[in-house]
Image: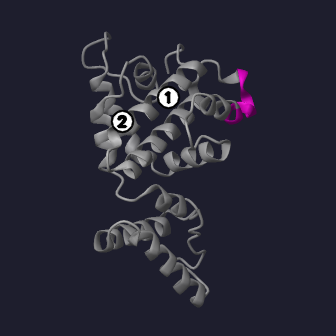
Amino acid sequence: MNSGFGFQQLIELCQRTHQEMQSRAGRSVDTFLVVRNWLFGWYIVEYEQNGADRAEYGRRFLVTLSKRLQEIGIRGSSPTRLKLYRAFYQQHRGIGPTVSDQLAMLLPFEGQPGIRPTASDESLSGLAETPHLPEDISNQLIKHFSLGWSHYVALLSIDNADERRFYEIEAELEEKRCGDGGAFSELDKVNMQMEKMGSSPSGERKVESGK
């Protein structure tokens, strides 16, 4: 990643992302919250791996980041929440290459023609230097997420990827049938059924749907 991407740029990028997601949300507040949280998770992971000054913060990084974000009025930025965003991104990082490739094409680039940066080197640094988050990026991410944030939090409790995907598909189908709130009710219903049986489809654990 570009050596210029440091902690202050991370703060500014989170602030700009938060503000722009709010302004675009309209009636789809929860959808944009999911997108914002995935982006926050991406920023955190990339900074932890490649941030220019990451060594200065060490194990106190998330606590320090949380304090700074709360100081500028970003709600939902406690250390616990930031860990959730990081875990959420890591569970859904498979969409990262698609998003980063699109981002690389949207950002100004003065290098060799035909050679574009990726999320692992320059694209996040370039994003930090742009005045606005490209709308195409948020639109691309929206296509990947059809559930509300509380649903994804419930799914984060499932370690087994196949089992998690099973419940995610079930929740998506239920939400299409019942609308908002139906998916979470479906997770609760599945929990009750699995608890009676003493197992989940994989025989390992049930979904924890607590907030």
Q: Nearer the viewer, mark 1 or mark 2?
A: 2
Front one among 105 and 196: 196
Single out the residue that lies furthest toward the right: 59
Residue ID at (40%, 40%): 96
Give the side of residue 205 with respect to residue 60, left or right: left
The answer to whether any part of residue 163 appears in the image is yes
The percent position of residue 84, horizontal first and vertical second, equals 58, 49
The percent position of residue 41, horizontal first and vertical second, equals 52, 40
* Earlier residue among tags 1 and 2: 1
Q: Dot 2, crowdedness within 10 Å: few (<14), some or many (≥20)?
A: few
147 lies above or below 106: below
As for residue 17 lying within the magenta part, the answer is no
Q: Which residue is mark 1?
A: 15
The percent position of residue 183, horizontal first and vertical second, equals 41, 70
Q: Which residue is mark 2?
A: 23
Secondary element type, mark 1: helix
The magenta segment is: 56-63
